[in-house]
């Protein structure tokens, strides 16, 4: 599926319940057109990972996800040789007196990891490759990505260079626990995903929690938007708003009351200090404010 | 717009961004130009979005981009410098200079406590100050020339903070886990027979350092020397993040990158507006925890707080934020210049509030203490601190649990 206009992409995303604003859609649209990776930065829980999932389902293609962590290395992210098989092959060759040990570094002994899998030549369609939370991996790992993200190829010393026939659509996300290296940034388009404004968040909530009572939905979003203005250690993201709405719906709440907020506050605030600060008077104050709005 | 016009505008706009301090590579420019073939150039919003995702690579640059765009593709009012994060340089009433002692002007200051006065007297009698006496003299009693001398000595110090075991490995001939890949490859040379063993062992890296330096009024006598000290740290190591604070927190990592210490210090004094004001350490640490900790406290850093602990803020807040800071770093070290005085007791409200959460409490008042800090950092164990005992009264910790060392 290709999109002629940015609006088409925006509509298609909305049909899959992903509400994207113009600038995010433009970034995504251009990433596909210019064939460049898209680096999404933003606080946790603003829908960075979700965009890749939605895109994959929209394009009806495979989603390959690489979750980053400290110490992630080439053998887990790119490829690994199948050593037991290689060893067996050598023993076999010895037993059958065939001196063909050289070819143990060939395709059949290669184990594909996500990145190599994404550029596999046997594909008929470009997959979506999600490199999630890149900032969790150490700086060294970024170097592994450079060749892939600029030339859509991976060089394996024993085998040669493997190049993608259909370059993947790459979404890289970062929570900014450290700055991603310039060399990598230069190869990407960049978009900062911010917390949504009231109307947008309301749309997201209605899209994600379809059965939600309209009054309750509005109150929830107003409440969360008020919370984001406070001096908290961790401001709730959209993911928290959705969780909270689901929690309240599960408790058959129809409107926010002091008790219902107090019971479910743990769905939006995840730090004890923040909970302590908000619980009680602050909840009452916010409820009073959104009641009068 | 004709083709020629568009490319002119692209280049012009990129120039404007660069002149405002945004780093835009030629590659970005090419991407932007290519992007414009896919969007409606006459649609201002589309142009904006295309420029945004191709030219900008840092969230910090966003406000600059917005005002540059508004200015260049004018429709709104003129460029609003105040709305951006651009360093707006205020011309101060006094010459831009850190508190610095002029030669011979030793006695014109009234210290906060009587001990200071006595120290100064001691300092004033040491007219013969060779480098050995300079090492043990209190920074606060340095003359202008001595500051220069001490700076040179400080520059020669080597900083090698302790190592942290990373999850990455490197080749090793003797120990570690067996490196099958390497063995398989080398065995190809001997018809599949592995003749040599190869291993991989964990790689070690130096721990990053985060410095929070108090530059409020009560630290006046020490600020200049300590800032030079922070500059030395920045100069000698890769991963140092530095902040200064009085009533508010300012990140000075980039400013201190300047090679020349005078340039660096001048840059800092231009940017920082609360020199020699009051201190609200609790608020500062909170600001650090909320705004910066996620960005600079990964990879197990050692955090140095340099302050005399004279705090005008809320002690409960200080305790709470110090506790959080301690939880999120490898070791939290408090450097207090007043601790150089053997009669000093950390009994100020701020110090008492912070004390239970400090892993090490050491002086930083002369060159010897800085050398000691260096060797302490170098020998810091790579093990997690033992779980803290929860104590009801912070005072209980003061003298028994924490290493209070005098040189």
Image (tube, grey):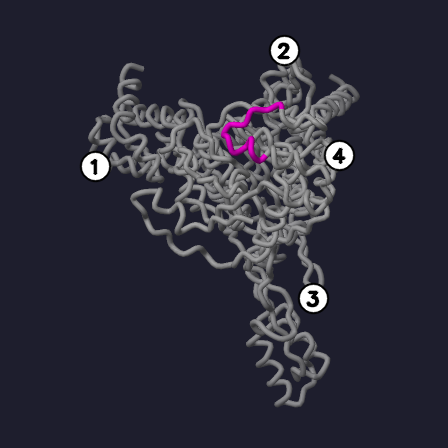
Q: Position of residue B5 (x, y in %)?
A: 77, 19
Q: Position of residue B317 (x, y in %)?
A: 38, 33
Q: Secondary structure at mark 2?
A: loop
Q: Residues within 10 Å of mark 2 (few under 14, many from 20)?
A: few
Q: CA distance from mark 1 to mark 4?
A: 56 Å
Most foreground residue, A143 or A178: A178
Pointer 4 and pointer 3 on the same chain: no
Of the numbered discs in the image, which one, if any, rests on residue A251?
Answer: 1
Q: Secondary structure at mark 1?
A: loop
Pointer 1 and pointer 3 on the same chain: yes
Q: Is residue B154 visible?
A: yes
Of the numbered discs in the image, which one, if any, rests on residue B193?
Answer: none
Instruction: Specify the segment rendered in magenta.
Output: B108-119
Pointer 3 and pointer 2 on the same chain: no
Most foreground residue, B58 or B85: B85
Q: CA distance from mark 4 to mark 3?
A: 34 Å
Residue denoted by label 2? B75
- Dividing the image into 4 quarters, which one contains the N terminus of chain A? top right
Q: Secondary structure at mark 3?
A: loop
Of the numbered discs in the image, which one, if any, rests on residue A159?
Answer: 3
Q: Any magenta on residue B121?
A: no
Question: Which chain's residue wears label 1?
Answer: A
Residue denoted by label 4? B26
Closer to the camera: disc 4 or disc 3? 4
- Which is more N-terminal, label 3 or label 1? 3
Q: Quadrant of residue B358?
A: top left
**Residue in the picture at 60% in, 54% down:** B375
B198, above or below B216, in the image: below
Q: Position of residue B322 (x, y in %)?
A: 43, 40
**Residue in the picture at 57% in, 53% down:** B376
Q: CA distance from mark 3 to mark 2?
A: 57 Å
């Amino acid at each position: 599926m290709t999109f002629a206009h940015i609006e088409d992409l925006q509509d298609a995303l909305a049909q899959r319940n992903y509400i994207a604003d113009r600038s995010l859609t433009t970034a995504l649209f251009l990433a596909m057109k210019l064939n460049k990776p898209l680096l999404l930065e933003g606080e946790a829980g603003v829908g960075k990972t979700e965009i890749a999932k939605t895109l994959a389902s929209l394009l009806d293609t495979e989603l390959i996800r690489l979750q980053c962590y400290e110490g992630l290395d080439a053998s887990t992210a790119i490829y690994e040789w199948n050593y037991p098989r290689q060893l067996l092959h050598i023993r076999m060759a010895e037993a059958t007196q065939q001196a063909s040990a050289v070819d143990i570094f060939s395709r059949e002994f290669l184990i594909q990891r996500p990145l190599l899998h994404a550029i596999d030549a046997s594909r008929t369609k470009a997959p979506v490759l999600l490199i999630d939370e890149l900032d969790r991996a150490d700086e060294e790992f970024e170097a592994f990505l450079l060749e892939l993200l600029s030339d859509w190829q991976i060089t394996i010393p024993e085998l040669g260079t493997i190049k993608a026939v259909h370059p993947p659509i790459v979404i890289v996300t970062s929570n900014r626990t450290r700055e991603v290296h310039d060399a990598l940034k230069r190869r990407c388009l960049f978009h900062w995903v911010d917390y949504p404004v009231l109307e947008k968040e309301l749309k997201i909530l209605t899209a994600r929690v379809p059965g939600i009572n309209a009054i309750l939905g509005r109150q929830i979003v107003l409440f969360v938007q008020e919370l984001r203005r406070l001096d908290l250690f961790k401001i709730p993201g959209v993911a928290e708003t959705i969780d909270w709405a689901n929690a309240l719906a599960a408790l058959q709440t129809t409107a926010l009351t002091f008790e219902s907020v107090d019971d479910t506050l743990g769905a939006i605030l995840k730090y004890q200090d923040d909970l302590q600060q908000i619980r009680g008077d602050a909840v009452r104050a916010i409820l009073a404010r959104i009641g009068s709005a | 717009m004709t083709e020629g016009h568009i490319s002119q505008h692209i280049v012009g706009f990129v120039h404007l961004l660069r002149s405002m301090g945004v780093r835009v590579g030629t590659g970005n420019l090419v991407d932007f130009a290519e992007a414009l073939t896919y969007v409606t150039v006459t649609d201002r919003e589309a142009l904006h979005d295309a420029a945004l995702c191709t030219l900008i690579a840092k969230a910090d640059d966003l406000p600059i981009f917005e005002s540059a765009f508004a200015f260049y593709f004018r429709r709104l009012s003129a460029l609003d410098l105040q709305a951006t994060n651009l360093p707006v340089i205020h011309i101060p009433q006094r010459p831009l200079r850190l508190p610095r002692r002029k030669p011979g002007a030793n006695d014109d200051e009234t210290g906060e406590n009587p001990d200071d006065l006595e120290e100064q007297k001691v300092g004033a009698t040491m007219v013969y100050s060779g480098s050995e006496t300079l090492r043990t003299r209190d920074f606060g009693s340095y003359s202008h020339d001595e500051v220069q001398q001490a700076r040179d000595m400080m520059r020669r110090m080597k900083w090698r903070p302790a190592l942290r075991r990373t999850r990455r490995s490197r080749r090793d001939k003797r120990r570690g886990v067996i490196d099958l890949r390497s063995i398989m490859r080398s065995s190809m040379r001997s018809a599949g027979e592995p003749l040599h063993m190869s291993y991989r062992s964990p790689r070690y890296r130096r721990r990053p350092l985060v410095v929070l330096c108090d530059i409020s009024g009560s630290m006046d006598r020490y600020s200049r020397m300590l800032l030079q000290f922070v500059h030395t740290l920045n100069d000698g190591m890769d991963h140092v993040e530095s902040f200064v604070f009085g009533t508010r927190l300012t990140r000075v990592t980039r400013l201190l990158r300047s090679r020349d210490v005078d340039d660096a210090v001048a840059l800092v004094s231009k940017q920082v507006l609360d020199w020699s004001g009051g201190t609200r350490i609790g608020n500062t640490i909170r600001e650090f925890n909320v705004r910066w900790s996620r960005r600079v406290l990964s990879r197990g850093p050692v955090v140095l707080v340099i302050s005399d602990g004279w705090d005008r803020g809320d002690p409960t807040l200080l305790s709470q934020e110090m506790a959080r800071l301690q939880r999120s770093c490898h070791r939290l070290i408090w450097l207090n210049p007043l601790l150089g005085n053997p009669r000093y007791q950390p009994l100020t409200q701020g110090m008492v509030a912070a004390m239970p959460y400090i892993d090490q409490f050491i002086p930083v008042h002369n060159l010897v203490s800085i050398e000691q800090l260096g060797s302490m950092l170098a020998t810091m164990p790579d093990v997690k601190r033992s779980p803290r005992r929860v104590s009801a009264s912070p005072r209980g910790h003061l003298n028994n649990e924490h290493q209070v060392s005098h040189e």
